[in-house]
Amino acid sequence: MAEFITTYSGIHFYPTKPVLEDIRITYIAHALSMLCRGNGHVAHFFSVGQHCINCCVEAECRGYSDRLILACLLHDAAEAYMSDVTRPLKAYMPDYVRKEEYLLDVIYEKYLGSILTEKEKVLVKRIDDDMLYYDLLNLLNEPQAGPVPVMKSAFTQNYEPFDKVEKRYLELFYKYYGAQRPVDVGSAQT
């Protein structure tokens, strides 16, 4: 049994034993733009990449730091290598969740310079949960109990072609990654 996945460019990637050099933002952007939220149980195709973009833009509008804006864009990046498992199922998969969190920490370490603090995790999770409220409402017509989150951004869950989502994801990444680290973003590091 193989312990790796093959990326669309042909590189073997080991999700449970990630090699830093094999994590590439272009792979993440491509895969997330092709992954459908909610295992496809939505009104129309809506990618994980679109959701991450919406979270990133919301973080911008809430005045989050550049680091946290980038963290919001990357918050589902591990799913590029491990897939999008729905929350109800994850509750029964603690080992999977630990491996996913580890991979996400490796990705944060690579692109943010360190893992998120507990306070940062709370802020990113708040936007993720607020956006989920609207994803469920607009893509499944399923209002959630509790207060309606007040959003600062004008976001949409309209269908967007994967290549457009991939391009926008990378634009946002380079904008905020450059703000975090003054490096050549065209290098093999990304």
Image: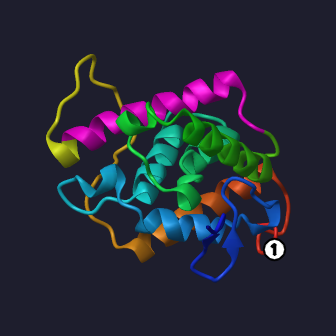
For the record, the magenta segment spans 115-137
**Identity of the residue drawn at 66% across and 22% down:** 119
| The N terminus - image quarter | bottom right
Q: How many marks?
A: 1
Other-residue count near label 1 (Cα within 10 Å), few / some / many at <14 / 14–19 / ≥20: few
Position of residue 30 in the picture relative to residue 25 (left or right): left
**Identity of the residue drawn at 59% across and 37% down:** 95
What residue sits right under mark 1 in the picture? 188
Position of residue 168 in the picture relative to residue 37 (left or right): right
Q: Extreme front residue here?
A: 1
Give the image location of residue 108, x and y in percent.
72, 46
Q: Is residue 153 above or below residue 182?
A: above
Position of residue 70 in the picture relative to residue 127 (left or right): right
Q: Extreme right residue here?
A: 183
Q: Within the magenta stretch, is there residue 106?
A: no
Give the image location of residue 21, x and y in percent.
81, 66
